[in-house]
Image (cartoon, rainbow, N blue to C red):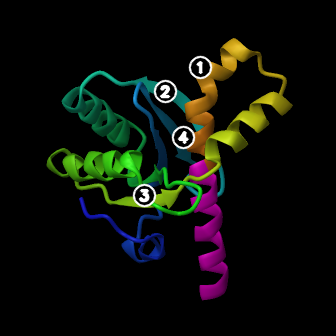
């Protein structure tokens, strides 16, 4: 499972595959799945974190069930663009996934994704309790939608 740049995805020929978006938290992993046309990101239930091997096995199962060709994972950079401990943890997580899957991963700058997800949930008048349960998957959908929009812009300039 290599780490690739988003610009490399079109050359992979994954037209029959979905893309997954992941928001890696300490207690949960937010999940969103694209449609086959790579236009829309749909939030899915979060994955409650246990230990890495269990989390990895559950993700691989989701990859298989959802026909995933590539994973977009949020890279939680600091607001000034520097990398902190959470970036290192995310990179280590992806590196450790090497022994579980061949699915390529793309790092996606996730600055403000949780803020945007929270704002979206507030606009939909989702209660505080339900927001807590949905925020990570909403953030994953925000991350994935940004990547899908970028892929669609790449396709427009190439075609």
Is residue 153 depicted above or below 85 in this figure?
below
Quarter of the C terminus within the rendering: bottom right
Residue at left offset 23%, top offset 53%: 95
How packed is label 2: few (under 14 Cα within 10 Å), some, or many (20 or more)? many
Could you say which quadrant of the image residue 104 lies in? bottom left
- Does any portion of residue 27 appear in the rendered image? yes
* SS assignment at label 2: strand
Q: Nearer the viewer, mark 1 or mark 3?
A: 3
Indicate whether 120 appears above or below 49: below
Dot 2 and dot 1 residues touching (CB under 8 Å): yes
Q: Is residue 133 magenta?
A: no
The local crowd at label 4, few if under 14, some if 14 to 19, many if 20 or more residues have their Cα within 10 Å, is: many
Mark 2 — residue? 46
Magenta region: 143-159
Which residue is denoted by mark 1 in the rendering? Answer: 133
Residue 18 lies left or right of residue 157; in this view the side is left
How far across and how far down the image is residue 28, in percent? Answer: 44, 27
Q: CA distance from mark 4 to mark 3?
A: 24 Å
Mark 4 highlights which residue?
Answer: 32
Give the class, few, some or many, for how many residues have Cα within 10 Å of label 1's Cα (few <14, many ≥20): some
Which residue does the image show at 24% across and 25% down from the upper left?
51
**Disc 2 to disc 1, C-alpha distance:** 8 Å
The first of marks 4 and 1 along the sequence is 4
Q: Are marks 4 and 3 in contact (CB under 8 Å)?
A: no
Quadrant location of the N terminus in the rendered image: bottom left
**Where in the figure is residue 11, as x and y percent of width and height?**
41, 77
Q: From the viewer's perspective, is 49 left or right of 152?
A: left
**Horizontal side, residue 96 vs residue 27: left or right:** left
- Can you identify the residue that label 3 sits on? 83
Q: Between disc 4 and disc 2, whose residue precedes?
A: 4
- Could you tell me which secondary element the residue under label 3 belongs to? loop
Q: What's the distance in space between the residues labelled 4 and 1, CA to CA?
A: 14 Å
């Amino acid at each position: 499972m290599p780490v690739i740049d988003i610009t490399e995805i079109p050359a992979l020929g994954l037209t029959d595959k979905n893309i997954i978006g992941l928001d890696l938290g300490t207690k949960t992993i937010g999940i969103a799945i694209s449609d086959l046309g790579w236009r829309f990101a749909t939030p899915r239930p979060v994955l409650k974190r246990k230990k890495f091997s269990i989390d990895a096995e559950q993700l691989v199962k989701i990859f298989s069930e959802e026909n995933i060709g590539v994973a977009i994972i949020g890279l939680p950079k600091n607001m000034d663009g520097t990398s902190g401990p959470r970036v290192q943890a995310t990179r280590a997580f992806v590196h450790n996934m090497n022994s579980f899957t061949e699915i390529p991963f793309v790092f996606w700058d996730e600055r403000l994704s949780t803020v945007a997800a929270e704002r979206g949930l507030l606009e939909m008048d989702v209660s505080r309790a339900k927001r807590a349960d949905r925020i990570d998957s909403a953030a994953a959908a925000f991350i994935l939608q940004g990547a899908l929009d970028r892929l669609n812009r790449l396709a427009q300039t190439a075609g």
